[in-house]
Amino acid sequence: MKTSKLFFKTLPALLLFISVAIRGFGAAPARQEYYEIRIYHIDQKAQADRVDAYLKDVYIPALHRAGISKIGVFKPVEADTAFGKLIYVFIPVKTLDKFSALPELLDKDEVYNKSARDYIDAPFDNPPYARYESILLKAFPLMPEFKTPSYSTAPDQRIYELRNYESATEAKAAKKIQMFNEGGEMKIFEQLGFNAVFFAQVIVGSHKPNLMYMTTFSDMKTHDEKWKAFQAHPDWIKLKAVPEYLNTVIKPKPYLLHPTSYSDF
């Protein structure tokens, strides 16, 4: 009985201690998200029109109903040789379970299945696309959730730059990821206002080991100015000379994109 009374007397103090400790440590870090980047390969304008209609009127609304509120859709800038040939779709999910559940959710969505007939049941000799590829990524620890930028310029003026960095080995790729996170490369992007959407490691794809990230700009002039400032930044000049970070990337591939008029960001 005495032990029980002592417990209840000390319980408020114990709870207060736990509460203070939790506030002291701050909120738990956000769980790292996963992203699918789907790339449609298009052979002709008629296919581009069909994929646009499917994404705009059928697929994106279905993903919204499934609880994914922000879907990005992008196309190469006019000066790119890939202009008119590719459509990029960015799909963020909180967990791998959510990602794996999407096909079943769509299969059970009556509105989707009714609206997607032209796309789903397209004849073999008149497909809506040539091929599409899917890349699965996991967000970096220091940017565990994606962010959407906001610009007043028209979509066809905005520049969204998707970069793909391939490394020679898994060890070199791990060092490049460390360079972005603990090394401070992402902080430089943030200081200079690159308005990054995400930084992530590719976990399923055809060019591993590699990472991908997307930065955004109101227009091409701002893009060029920001990158010029990045290359001259003293922190970047110092960071890229660190011996352990040398030769961590063998194939940097930048892709300049415009968001479509129906993209969520």
Image (cartoon, rainbow, N blue to C red):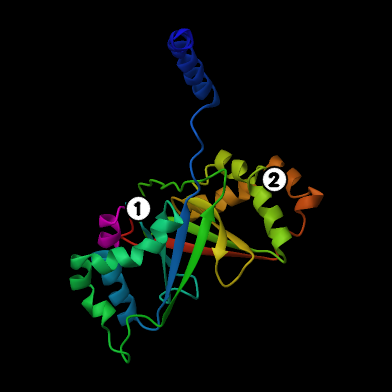
Q: In this view, does 90 lie to the left or right of 178?
A: left
Residue 235 on image: x %, y %: 70, 41
Q: In this view, does 101 lie to the left or right of 222?
A: left
Which amino acid does the dot numbered 1 rest on? Lys
Secondary structure category for the residue under label 2: helix
- Residue 91 visible in image: no
Mark 1 → mark 2, Cα distance in angstroms: 32 Å
Kindly identify the residue that appears in the image at 27 percent across and 71 percent down.
54
| Image: 202 above or below 179 | below
* Segment tinted magenta in the rendering: 60-68
Residue 19 on image: x %, y %: 47, 20
Q: Name the residue under label 2.
A: 236
**What is the residue that sits farthest to the right in this orientation?**
243
Residue 71 on image: x %, y %: 36, 57
Q: Main secondary structure of the magenta part?
A: helix
Asked if the magenta segment contains residue 75, the reply would be no
Asked if the magenta segment contains residue 63, the reply would be yes
| Image: 3 above or below 138 | above
* Residue nearer the viewer, 83 or 23: 23
Q: Mark 1 points at which residue?
A: 70
Q: Is residue 118 left or right of residue 6?
A: left
User: Which callout, 1 or 2, points to the residue nearer the camera?
Assistant: 1
- Residue 116 badge: none
Q: Residues within 10 Å of mark 1 (few under 14, many from 20)?
A: some
